[in-house]
Image (spheres, grey):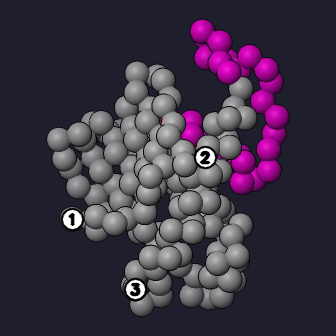
Amino acid sequence: MPATGSPLVLVISSPVQQVSLLSSLLRTLQAAVRDCAQNTEAGRSAFSGQDAPVLVAATETEDSGLRIAFSFRGPSGSELGEFDRVAFSAFIADMASALKTSPQRTLWGTPVRPLVRASDEGERMRLFLEDLVRLGDVTVAAGENKLVISGGKVEASFI
């Protein structure tokens, strides 16, 4: 069972998912989280050495679906609570920013205005959000910040 204080939690409404969708989501999530973390002072320091933090996931099924709790671990497997807080706060802030700047879509799913190619970090966040939407009803939470996608609609609560 994952630690209750895990800073980043993803809840997918269905515990059964296509492997390709879940695999893609985990890859894009890892890339986006690491990029966001590396853009912090703590992250630049932590990722500059050979013993960089490793993103780990603990999963469980519950009534609301599949719950995946993410955290970083040090080289000896030690928990990195403060680093997690900083890294996942940066991730949630970047997610909120990406959502605010995303183009509105038409009834046919195409953007109203052309997409502007962002930096690699922005591109990775965009890919993660696209993968996230494909999973159906999902919730991403870090601390008091939460993003809920349900029925094709996005509800964000960012503090």
Disc with the residue nearer the chain's start (1 vs 3): 1
Eyeballing the image, is 136 above or below 92?
above
* Residue located at (71% from left, 26% from top): 103
Residue highlighted by disc 2: 95
Residue highlighted by disc 1: 1
Image location of residue 1, percent across then percent down: 21, 65
* Residue located at (80% from left, 24% from top): 114
Q: Secondary structure at mark 3?
A: loop
Label at residue 149: none
Q: Amino acid at mark 1?
A: Met
Assess disc 1: are there few (<14), some (14-19) or many (≥20) residues with their C-alpha within 10 Å of its C-alpha. few
Residue highlighted by disc 3: 78
Assess disc 3: are there few (<14), some (14-19) or many (≥20) residues with their C-alpha within 10 Å of its C-alpha. few
Eyeballing the image, is 70 above or below 157?
below
Residue 24 visible in the current orientation: no
Image location of residue 24, percent across then percent down: 50, 47
Q: Secondary structure at mark 1?
A: loop
Q: CA distance from mark 3 to mark 2?
A: 27 Å
Eyeballing the image, is 52 above or below 58?
below
Given the current orientation, which residue lies at the most extreme top position?
Answer: 107
Eyeballing the image, is 135 above or below 143?
above
Image location of residue 11, percent across then percent down: 34, 45
Q: Secondary structure at mark 2?
A: helix
Q: Amino acid at mark 3?
A: Ser
**Res 148 quadrant in image:** top left
Q: Which residues are magenta?
A: 104-133
Assess disc 2: are there few (<14), some (14-19) or many (≥20) residues with their C-alpha within 10 Å of its C-alpha. many
